[in-house]
Image (cartoon, rainbow, N blue to C red):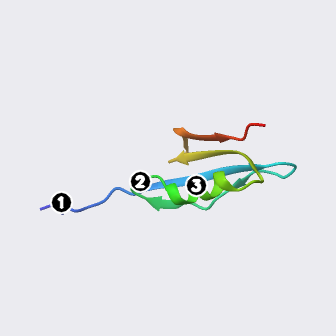
Amino acid sequence: MKNATTRRLRGFRIQVYHKGKPSIITPTIWAEQPPVEQWELVTQDPETIQADLFRSGRKMKGYHYKRTG
């Protein structure tokens, strides 16, 4: 009999671009839902120019950030 309480964890990574520096990719975050807290920290950083959230190696729609101005 299978356990009905199994959770499906997915690997999330955030790729961050800073002005004048190479891009940074965060270590894999294993979670059921996107890591919203980490995403907000990245997008609130004034040095961040652009950021993308990846789930299982693919860009997630709705989680693309690009600083304007």
- Label 3 SS: helix
- Label 2 SS: loop
x 57%, y 47%: residue: 53
Q: Which residue is denoted by mark 3 in the rendering? A: 40
In the picture, measured across the screen, residue 47 lies left or right of residue 14, that is right
Q: CA distance from mark 1 to mark 3?
A: 33 Å
- Amino acid type assigned to the residue bearing label 1 in the image: Ala
The residue closer to the viewer here, 49 or 23, is 49
x 16%, y 60%: residue: 2
In the picture, measured across the screen, residue 51 lies left or right of residue 33, that is right
Q: Earlier along the polypeptide chain: callout 1 or callout 3?
A: 1
Q: Earlier along the polypeptide chain: callout 1 or callout 2?
A: 1
Residue 37 is situated, as x and y percent measured from the top left of the image, at 53, 59
Residue 3 is situated, as x and y percent measured from the top left of the image, at 18, 63
Residue 42 is situated, as x and y percent measured from the top left of the image, at 65, 55
The residue closer to the viewer here, 26 or 46, is 46
Q: Quadrant of the C terminus?
A: top right
Relative vertical location of residue 7 with respect to residue 67 in this rendering, above or below: below
- Amino acid type assigned to the residue bearing label 3 in the image: Glu
- Amino acid type assigned to the residue bearing label 2 in the image: Gln
In the picture, measured across the screen, residue 28 lies left or right of residue 8, that is right
Contact (Cβ within 8 Å) of mark 1 with mark 3 = no
Q: Residue furthest right?
A: 20
The residue closer to the viewer here, 67 or 17, is 67
x 58%, y 55%: residue: 40
Q: Which residue is denoted by mark 1 in the rendering? A: 4
Q: Earlier along the polypeptide chain: callout 2 or callout 3?
A: 2
Circle number at residue 33: 2
Relative vertical location of residue 11 with respect to residue 68 in this rendering, above or below: below
Contact (Cβ within 8 Å) of mark 1 with mark 2 = no
